[in-house]
Image (cartoon, grey):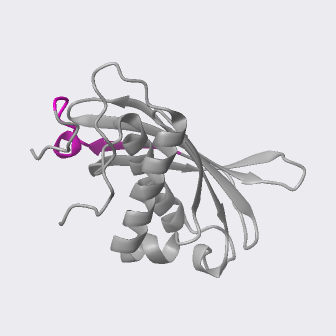
Amino acid sequence: MAPLEIQPLAPAGAGAVISDAIRTQHVQAVLDALKRRSPIYGTILSTLTLHSASQGRVVCRLVLDSMHVNSRGGLHGAVSATIVDMTTGMAIASWDLRDTTGASADMHLSYLGTAVIGDELEIVATSEKVGGSLAFVSIRIDKLALDGTRTPVTLAQHTKFVRASAKNPSTGVNTPV
């Protein structure tokens, strides 16, 4: 697989503080590249938007349309899994500004509720730990009501193998396995 086409940011030295604005800009570039390069992401999640990014945490939104629901009109489980797969990568990218975000090792989803066409989802993905080989990310997908209340739809945990996507601390560039 060819590397993502992302405009590189200047590497940060050890201990450098990276602003949330820089993280958000970087994660948006990763998101845009994934949508361009992946037919699944580009089709199913073409309308997913990034609302914020901080170290190890991203918040996204998605308004459901006919592409996202099953034959009974509710959010399709495969779409939930696709959301989890994409947003966990974004949370990992926000951790240290890496351009590639690893391969799935394990994914668990709990379906707590449903959503229908027109519902807005808020997705919060949080990197609990990004290590040398594995990253552990928790995800919460909530349905947002017009009055601001949230109803849980999906809770998930995703473990990704990230050794091949780790930044080289001296250059700030992704290094292969």
Task: Specify the segment rendered in magenta.
Answer: 156-170
Q: Reply above or below: 102 against 129.
A: below
Determine the residue positioned at 77% across, 53% down: 144
Q: Residue furthest left?
A: 177
Check residue 43 for magenta coloring.
no
Quadrant of the drawing holding the N terminus = bottom left
22 horizontally vs 111: left or right: left
Quadrant of the drawing holding the C terminus = top left
Q: Residue furthest top?
A: 15
Observer able to see residue 125: no
Observer able to see residue 148: yes
Q: Nearer the viewer, residue 76 or 147?
A: 147
Q: Reply above or below: 126 against 83.
A: above
Q: Nearer the viewer, residue 130 or 150?
A: 130
8 horizontally vs 173: left or right: right
Check residue 166 for magenta coloring.
yes
